Image (spheres, coloured by chain):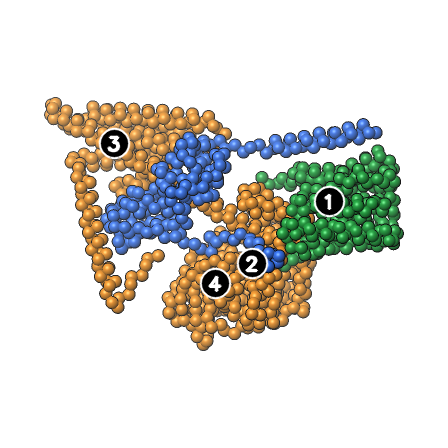
Chain colours: A green, B blue, C orange
Amino acid sequence: MTSTTMRLAPSLARRQGLTLLALLPGVLVLLMQQGRPALINLLLALYSSLLTDMTCQASRKQPLATSWRQPDCLLTGLMLALMLPMATPAGLLLAACMMAVLWRHLFGGTAHGPFHPVLVSLLMLSPWLASPLPAQNIALSLALLAGGVWLLWRRLNAWQVPAGFCLVLLVSLPLGTGWLLLQPALWLLLGWVMTDGNSTPITPRGRLIHGQAAGLLCVSFAALTHKADITPLLAAILLLMSAAAPLVDQLLQPRQRT
Amino acid sequence: MNVLVFIALLLLAVWLLRRVMQHNKQQPEHKDPRPLAERIDAILPQTQCGQCGHAGCQPYAAALAKGEDSINRCPPGGEEGIRKLAALLHTDYLPFAADAPPSKPKAVALIDESTCIGCTLCIQACPVDAILGSAKQMHTVLAAECTGCELCLVPCPVDCISMRPATSSPSDWRWGYPVIVIKAIKSEARP
Amino acid sequence: MRRFLSLPGGFTLPLPSRKHDSPPASVLPLPPRLVLGLQQCLPCVQPGQQVLKYQRLADADSEYGVALHAPTSGRIIAIQPQAQALPGAPLADTLILEADGRDEALPLQAGDPSRLTPLSLALQLQDMGVAGNHGPLLALDWAMQQCALPLLIINAVEDEPYLAATATLLEEQAEAFVAAIAMLEQVLRPARIVLAVSQTDSSEALQAAVSQHGWQVSTINTPYPAGDETTLIRQLASPAEAAHSLCLPADAVVAAGAAILHGQPCISRLVTLVDKLDRPGSVQALLGTPLSHLLNFAGAKANYAITHGGGLRGYALPADQADAMGLHWHSQCLQARTPDTAGQQQDCIRCGDCLRICPSKLQPQELYWHCQQDNVETANAWGLQDCTLCGLCDAVCPSQLPLLDSFRHTALQYQSTQQQQQQADHARQRHRFRQFRLERDKQEKAQRLAARAAEQAAKREQTATAAPQENKPTPAAADKQAAIAAAMARAAQRNSQHLEKQSTSSADDRQADARAAAMAASRQAAIDAAMARAAARKAAQDAAKAASAGSQQVDTTAASDDKQALIQSAMQRAAMQKAAQANAAPANMDADKKALIEAAMQRAAAQKTAQANAAPTSMDADKKALIEAAMQRAAAQKAAQADKAHAPGKPEKPENT
């Protein structure tokens, strides 16, 4: 017997749909820039992640319709396709998508699992991801930034983590790490991965600290490794921070009660 | 540069560790200075019914504290009571023995006043002085004080005492567990 | 005057604009029968009795209850337990009134508010059945204190979605509302009156009246849980006023005005009917109207689920029992919704929305986790007791977790375990006192026997020795007795000292100390009794000095303060029990008096024992004979009853409940 009749916030499925929608500008920009190979990459990623998800659902005896009703897997695939360089071989992209979706289902689907699947997949495949030059892409970065801001405006994401991260990034501009701001991967991780509640602290203060710490680590490593591909590096930092999230949460509990 | 960054990271880690240690120190294990038997007695339901085979809750608590009895002998305490005892005594949860009297809902003794002969036997049997009356006068049970131990039933020579379920009022009612609606999955619903 | 309140969290709800959404309240046709729940009141009518409108059906059972009046004329069919329109539809005694349709009313007597004091007003409102949020509109214990009222808040805020009854009431009965507030002002004499309303465009009559009376209107524009009594007082009262201010719901204020000014008991209220209905809107309905009658009147579809209350705090009621559940005073709103609106529940994604919106700054996701684990203590550590059960976290949860339901469940469970613990503690106390009493009785009996033996021995000695010493009391026996008493006292003292040492060793815990003190007190009481007895013996030798000697004795033995208090209470109880013999037992005495009484009682007891030379040795036999006789009588009674029961035409004896 659930009593409350009124719902003041979108349901989980709708929320995920809107998050997916926020990626649309980025996808459009990428398609305009790259054309056919980008389209093939995107379709491949979406297709493989959807298929893996449905297989996992079937093996877990869950309704298959959840795969597209709650487009978690599509979001994962899309993010990977946007994040990995265009030159990535198709097999690697497929493997990345499958691994991410499998990781999610390994721990019982959405809202479970200790680390964000996209990060895990990126880190696991980083030895094979060879891309010496960072992909500077102003248009794509701006498009992703717009999507992220829209998500914040719709209050679908908490502002604390991105704000903390950006604050550190802006403060450390004199260190010469400004090129980070032009990395599409950074904005993707910032808007769609770091705002995932499962791998961040939940208190507002904790989230702010989480963002700042991640920003600090990112900037310090970026200052050390000049202009390399920072995607795996960022992934590693964020994984580290997710591991520290429970600690931060515990330390920053409001303690007015006994 | 490398060295500096790593030193900074190390310092951060050390600081965090110290915070954790402090945090753990701030919440010391809450120690109850009462003797163990007292703490056990505080958990027991105090019906004083003797269903555990002891002459009341306090002797049972003393026996438990000495480890002479098992924790599954208190039907009025219910399973919740066993769980609490197990947690206090750092033992495993034990289900009720098969021969143990079943756990009943709380009841209150009621004296049929027209039958009562005023023998005072039930007054002497009541462990909490919840029966009023004097010799050759009608007795009555103070429902608010009655623990429902049923010790007054046996001595009554005219069998005029009965157990009635404790009256429930809307204020006794509790919200039910929020139930998750179970829906049949299509693939399994198919024959 | 506008006032913006600041609250942490909260949510600005999409409330309907009042202009479009307040059709005039319609009057419900008379239902065939009324179902009146008897909560906190005792019926004063019998089933089968014919009652008139406004006739009293039940009296308040305590200072927290309110009376109940017949909403229409008719016949009482039954008084039986039925489901109530309360959360979870619990069973409670219900009075069922069959309306005869004539609606014959008792004459109403208009009252005169100028002669009322706050207390008489509170009593009159209780008699008229005007209920507030907790029991009668004006709490009797508050009225009894007769303290000055710095601030009276009239709460007309409806911040929860779907609630519209109060707004409709204010629009349609603005004059009555103003008159009611004026009446309250006249009787309660508050220093300040604030009307808290949720919309600025209140009716002209209200505005005019407000400007005329110098009342203050506060428009509450804040997020949702701002209409709470506590929140309003916190926000509208200055810190100095907050402790003594009063916040009264507007609908009850109107009912109070009708009750005092026109003598009309509270028998109906405005209900908002919303959602899947053909004719949603506000309805003036009699209390006790079956919910099905209300919803059918508003044109509910065949298959619906009922939610009682507003959109956030409302609770579900079983639709199949809608006939049996009657409207009560707190039914502001009824929603008929399609049965399957409950969405599918998913797992927490830790989005933190609940945390952001919580007005009490709690962490509902953690609370929910602990509540699901049934871990009440941890949930309390996370602030379950601070939860106001506003339902916002539940409403914003994207995973649609039943947060509110689980908080309600756990909070109530905690309350009931607390209650059980209290009862258990009480029972333990009684049991321990009983054990103490039995022990004490045994000791006293032994002492009496010893005294008698000593007396007899002394008599034998007397008869053996010369006659001239006859008149004097037996100093040897008295000495012996005193020696015994002193020895016992010393032993007891040693015991108590030992105990005291034990208790001081674990000094830091007050509870253990108190318990040890209680244990010591039982022994201490025995010591005191023994000493008093010794003093009494001396008093027999020297009657004139007895009192002072006794008091000195007691004074010298005075232990620490709390111990003394315990001893006093124990001795008082002992004295009360002996009161039947001694005839004199003042409830509270100081130590001196007590010693005197103790001495007197001892003397009386000594006299009695001296009189009773022959102990009743055949006690047991007597008792048995009595019991046997009683059993025979009982058997005879039973047989007679059985005969009666067998006899045709005679009704069976109703069971005592």
Name the secondary structure under disc 1.
Answer: helix
- Considering only order in the chain, which callout, 4 or 2, is on the residue closer to the N terminus? 4
Whether residue C10 can be seen here? no
**Residue visible at 70% across and 44% down?**
A103
In whole angstroms, how far apart are the C-alphas of marks 2 and 4? 25 Å
> What residue does disc 2 label?
C315
Whether residue C382 sits left or right of residue A219 in the image: it is left
Residue C188 in percent (x, y) is at: 53, 58
Whether residue C32 sits left or right of residue C20 in the image: it is left
Q: Amino acid at mark 3?
A: Ala
Name the secondary structure under disc 4.
Answer: loop
**Residue visible at 18% across and 45% down?**
C625
Tag 3–tag 2 contact (CB < 8 Å): no
Depth check, mark 3 against mark 2: the one in front is: 2
Whether labels 2 and 4 belong to a single chain: the reply is yes
Whether labels 3 and 1 belong to a single chain: the reply is no
Q: Amino acid at mark 2?
A: Tyr
Chain letter of disc 2 in the image: C
Q: Residues within 10 Å of mark 1 (few under 14, many from 20)?
A: many
> What residue does disc 4 label?
C129
> What residue does disc 3 label?
C446
Tag 2–tag 4 contact (CB < 8 Å): no
Q: Quadrant of the rendered structure where residue B98 is?
A: top left
Query: Can you say which quadrant of the picture contains the N terminus of chain A?
Result: bottom right
